[in-house]
Image (spheres, grey):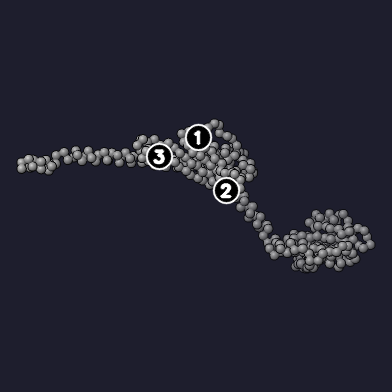
Amino acid sequence: MKRTGRWSGLFRSACGQFTIEASLTMPLILVVTVSLLFVALFWYNQTSLLQAAALSAERAAYAWDNSGKDLQTGEVDAGSNDGLYWRLTNDNLSNLFSFLLPTGAVKVTLPVSGPIPTGSSPTAKLTKSAAWFPPSWRGELQYENGGLLRKIGVDLQRPFTSPASTSRLWNKTSVDADAHAYVTDPMETIRLTDLARTFLAEIKGRIKPREALQSLVEPKTAVKEPVKITNHEQAANYLRTLVGGTKEKVQVSPGTKREIDAFDARGIAHQAYYTFNEKNLREVQMPKDIELLWQGTQVQGVVWHFFKLSKQDKVKLSQGLKQQLERSGIVVILHE
């Protein structure tokens, strides 16, 4: 009974309790603390590498339109440019047809060795950006030209030193990061926008879809040769058959009208002249057609057709009047 009581007192004693608990919990606390430190270091390296990849992609995209730009400041020397047509001839445009041709993105592998190539090619631009990375880093830079969307991608790997046990546990000996940036071209965007704005304003309302279809219709009546013209009415009928036009009257000014012998579907006014007086043509008829051409709304063009008299071999039209008509934008056709 006494022996049993002695052992019972030993188990109930609190002596050495702190030492036993410390020997059990301290290693666990130490392992957790060291592990957290390594996790923090790992994520620090990961985020710093991601920041480097994103910064490199953004700088390369910003300086893509001019290979002479400084990647850090964007500074460029006066007169330094890649030419007017570099987007067509030196921007990996063949990548657009990668579904047909065995072409792909332009790639540069890290680390870069040898001298940095000069020029405005995509390879030279990527190599210029890759030269900023330390030799111990691995990865690649690539450029894809998708037409409207042009993308620069940066994929980096950096060694991460850790204990062998941690490396086996995580199966990681390096940190990886990738980033991409799209090439923006504000100057070219402004030029294209201005071109589209001014071009559409010029062609708007010039011809309607229905009129465009009518202009493609062949004349219903074929002209039978030879045609003998003996008066103005026959000449006008011949023109209407030839161009598929109709006789029309248009308002030139509030007090002036112009009678058109043959007005075709394209808005061209054809005038027939069999017998004529050059003074009347200069002072009366020509000013009306010049005014219509200047307005550009009712008539899109004017053609004067001169027919020879039945008793003559050629049209008697002075060279001076012909040149004056052509300088005014009126087309002259002689039917002889």
Viewer-proximal residue, 237 or 160?
160
Q: Are marks 1 and 2 in contact (CB under 8 Å)?
A: no
Note whether 286 is above or below 123 in the view shown: below
Residue 96 against residue 293 in the figure, above or below: above
Confirm whether residue 62 shows in the render. Answer: no
Q: What amino acid is found at the position of numbered circle 1 in the picture?
A: Pro
Percent coordinates x, y for residue 7 in the rendering: 10, 41
- Residue toward you, 261 or 171: 171
- Nearest the camera: 139 or 329? 139
Q: Residue at x 62, y 39 (%)?
A: 79
Which residue is at a point 71% across and 62% down the rendered structure image?
212
Mark toward the start of the polypeptide (3 vs 1): 1
Dot 3 corresponds to which residue?
172
Circle 1 SS class = loop
Q: CA distance from mark 1 to mark 2?
A: 27 Å
Q: Amino acid at mark 2?
A: Gly
Question: In this rendering, would 28 be left or right of 298?
Answer: left
Say which residue label 1 marks. 111
- Identify which residue, 7 or 15, lies in the foreground: 7
Using the image, tell me which numbered label, if any, was put on residue 9.
none
In the rendered image, residue 180, in percent from the top left (x then y), is placed at 50, 45
Q: Earlier in the sequence, mark 1 or mark 2?
A: 1
Q: CA–CA distance between discs 2 and 3?
A: 35 Å
Quarter of the picture containing the C terminus is bottom right
Q: Which residue is mark 2?
A: 146
Which SS class for mark 2? loop
